[in-house]
Image (tube, helix red, strand yellow):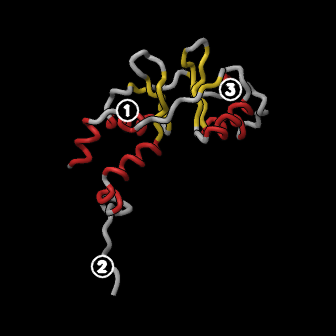
């Protein structure tokens, strides 16, 4: 199948990861939310001394801030995901998808040759890639891969 081959061969850079947006660990959750809204992104990379120390996502906001009843003045460092799993931009799309599936991640920082973040890979980017490159395969899949209608639809 062409889809399986492409996932194995093509690199993450082919997905054009979203440019990374950074925030400092001592900045407030309110500042993080404002930055996420301004750039229309679902996560921010948390950097200290030009080093990636964490990631702050919408999920972190919901689970670690709002559900816990913390004020929006809380520093991002208290509610971020520390030491996030990263992927190299030269890794295969397959490796990234496997990492996301196994870890339950919706966003992965993408690291370049210098070891610094060059982007953020989101599930949304992968879905767009699938739809753009394999529309017939994607649009013709049944809701469940082993589920087929018992009878023909229509007149």
* Element under disc 2: loop
Nearer to me, 80 or 47: 47
- Asked if the residue under mark 3 is in contact with the one under mark 2, i.e. CB atoms within 8 Å, the reply is no
Check disc 2 and report the residue beneath it.
Answer: 151
Tell which residue pokes out farthest to the left in this image.
1
Q: Quadrant of residue 58?
A: top right
Q: Which comes before the other along the chain, label 2 or label 3?
A: 3
Residue at (79, 33) in percent of width and height: 71
Residue at mark 2 to residue at mark 1: CA–CA distance: 43 Å
Check disc 1 and report the residue beneath it.
Answer: 13
Residue 110 image offset from top left, x and y in percent: 44, 27
Residue 36 image offset from top left, x and y in percent: 64, 37
- Asked if the residue under mark 1 is in contact with the one under mark 2, i.e. CB atoms within 8 Å, the reply is no
Q: Is residue 2 above or below residue 36?
A: below
Q: Nearer the viewer, mark 2 or mark 3?
A: 3
Label disc, if present, on residue 115 of the rendered structure: none
Q: Is residue 81 visible?
A: no
Check disc 3 and report the residue beneath it.
Answer: 76
Residue at (58, 29) in percent of width and height: 21
- Asked if the residue under mark 3 is in contact with the one under mark 1, i.e. CB atoms within 8 Å, the reply is no
Residue at (61, 42) in percent of width and height: 40
Q: Residues within 10 Å of mark 3 (few under 14, many from 20)?
A: many
């Amino acid at each position: 199948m062409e889809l399986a081959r492409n996932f194995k061969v093509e690199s993450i850079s082919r997905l054009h990861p979203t440019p990374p947006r950074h925030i400092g660990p001592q900045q407030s959750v309110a500042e993080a939310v404002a930055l996420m809204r301004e750039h229309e992104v679902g996560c921010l990379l948390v950097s200290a001394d030009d080093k990636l120390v964490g990631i702050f996502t919408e999920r972190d906001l919901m689970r670690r801030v709002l559900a816990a009843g913390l004020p929006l003045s809380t520093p991002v460092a208290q509610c971020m995901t520390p030491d996030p799993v990263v992927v190299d931009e030269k890794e295969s799309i397959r490796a990234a998808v496997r990492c996301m599936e196994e870890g339950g991640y919706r966003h992965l920082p993408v690291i370049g040759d210098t070891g610094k973040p060059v982007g953020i890979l989101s599930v949304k980017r992968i879905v767009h890639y699938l739809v753009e490159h394999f529309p017939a395969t994607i649009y013709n899949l049944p809701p469940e891969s082993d589920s087929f209608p018992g009878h023909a639809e229509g007149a």
